[in-house]
Amino acid sequence: MPKNVSRLLIANGERLLKDALKDMGRHLEQPTRRAFLQRSLSLGGLSLLSGCSIVDEESVEAALMKVSRFNDKAQAWLFDPNRLAPTYPDSMITRPFPFNAYYDEDEIREVDEQAYRLEVTGLVADKHPWTLAELRALPQADRITRHICVEGWSAIGKWGGVPFGSFLRRIGADLSAKYVGFKCVDDYYTSIDMPTALHPQTLLTLTYDGQPLPPRYGFPMKLRMPTKLGYKNPKYIQAIFVTNTYPGGYWEDQGYNWFGGS
Ligand SMILES: Nc1nc2c(c(=O)[nH]1)N[C@H]1C(S)=C(S)[C@@H](COP(=O)(O)O)O[C@H]1N2
Ligand SMILES: [Mo]
């Protein structure tokens, strides 16, 4: 990506942010405003602001959302559908791989393999629900990639499953639609842009480290994207839908940046 292009985008983002702050009037004291600006003026840095107390101000939240949506557009524009994320040798796998969810490990949902069906809805030609056996019968791939969580850790893991682009083509998804959304067994939900859904490293995973995905890592299924931050990678997937209506996400609706590229 040319540096002058990213600089131009950041400069535009800055102008947009300053305009938004001007709109807010004098809600904030000068030093707070300055700290706010300093923390905000980087692409990607915005996603970390959700824990900040000034988010209580409705106007600040509106300004942040404006910039975050600008950030989504910039990231979508910069996203190279053919550029691959790094992959690693077996020896670099992080053991044990960390567990994370919006609840503790003792509340992990156990999904019954026999009763499970993956629902597929929205802008797709073939809406038949999938059993795990049917999904396992599709051509599989595995990859060792790094998972990065905004909470400040990263780890290398090995996931295997169905390349998501080939799955979307198989079900006759409208590949010109804007979003693919995910609903999970544990009430988590998220959504991604179609170019990322079709990226060659995006996998609908059924295995972790060569074994069926254990409950802690999202049995029966996790969408694994090495081009996106951890919270964009849904575990315990119950339903997949293709849509042009912005679906948001569990953390995204609380202020995390929607595009969430790493
Ligand atoms: N269904 C579901 N998926 C989820 C989450 C969750 O709480 N529920 N947490 C996300 C976050 S923030 C991270 S970092 C990763 C953690 O995945 P891991 O337990 O395999 O490390 O799952 C993501 N997907
Ligand atoms: Mo995360």
Image: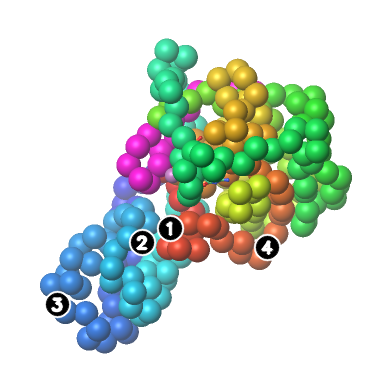
Label 4 vs label 3, nearer the camera: 3
Where is residue 178? Give x, y as percent.
64, 57
Residue located at (55% from left, 20% from top): 209
Residue that badge 4 annotates: 244
Mark 1 and mark 2 residues within 8 Å of each other at the beta carbon: yes
Where, by quadrant of the figure, is residue 31 drawn? bottom left
Residue located at (84% from left, 49% from top): 127
Secondary element at tag 2: helix
Q: Amino acid at mark 1?
A: Tyr
Label 4 vs label 1, nearer the camera: 1
Which stretch appears magenta?
141-154
Classify mark 2: residues with Cα within 10 Å, few (<14), some (14-19) or many (20+): some
Magenta stretch holds residue 151: yes
Asked if ligand 1 lies within 8 A of label 1, the reply is no
Q: Amino acid at mark 2?
A: Ser
Classify mark 1: residues with Cα within 10 Å, few (<14), some (14-19) or many (20+): many
1 or 2: tag closer to the N-terminus: 2
Secondary element at tag 3: helix
Q: Main SS type for the magenta part?
A: strand
The disc placed on residue 30 is: 3
Q: Is residue 85 visible?
A: yes
**Residue sticking out furthest to the top:** 91
Label 2 vs label 4, nearer the camera: 2
Mark 3 and mark 2 residues within 8 Å of each other at the beta carbon: no
Residue that badge 2 annotates: 50
Q: Is residue 16 left or right of residue 69?
A: left
Q: Amino acid at mark 4?
A: Asn
